[in-house]
């Protein structure tokens, strides 16, 4: 094997790895609590509780599973959460 063949093979492997990484970096407008939990390496229950307590800005999406619905977190809020952490507990009147 000559040097050029070795370089071409390494470049092919790098391109394949980059394609996999780009595929993982899909930016969505809204994320479910499961997706947020994976992104920040926490339990899904924890993320749902933070949404319920107002520690994460989220909205409820109606769904067919009873009255509750499903929490959705915006992309901007996910970035804020990663950079700044949880919001303080809301003040009660």
Image (cartoon, grey):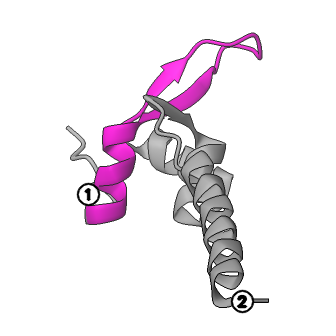
Judged left or right of residue 80, residue 64 is right
* Distance between mark 1 and mark 2 Cα atoms: 61 Å
As helix, strand or loop, the secondary structure at mark 2 comes to loop
Circle 1 or circle 2, nearest the eye: 2
Q: Is residue 15 magenta?
A: no
In percent of width and height, residue 71 lies at: 55, 31
Residue 2, labelled with which disc?
2
Residue nearest the observer in this picture, 67 or 70? 70
Compared to 32, does 17 lie above or below? Answer: below
As helix, strand or loop, the secondary structure at mark 1 comes to loop
Residue 88, labelled with which disc?
1
Q: Residue at x 71, y 79 (%)?
A: 5
Q: Quadrant of residue 92?
A: top left
Compared to 61, does 57 lie above or below? Answer: below
Q: Give the residues in magenta.
A: 55-83
In percent of width and height, residue 78 lies at: 39, 48
Q: Residue at x 47, y 30 (%)?
A: 30
Q: Residue at x 63, y 81 (%)?
A: 4
């Amino acid at each position: 094997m000559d040097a050029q063949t070795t370089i071409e093979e390494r470049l092919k492997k790098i391109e394949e790895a980059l394609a996999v990484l780009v595929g993982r970096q899909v930016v969505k407008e809204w994320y479910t609590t499961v997706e947020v939990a994976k992104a920040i390496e926490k339990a899904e229950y924890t993320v749902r509780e933070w949404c319920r307590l107002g520690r994460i800005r989220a909205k409820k999406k109606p769904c067919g599973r009873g009255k509750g619905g499903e929490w959705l977190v915006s992309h901007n809020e996910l970035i804020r959460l990663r950079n700044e952490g949880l919001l303080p507990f809301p003040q009660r009147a």
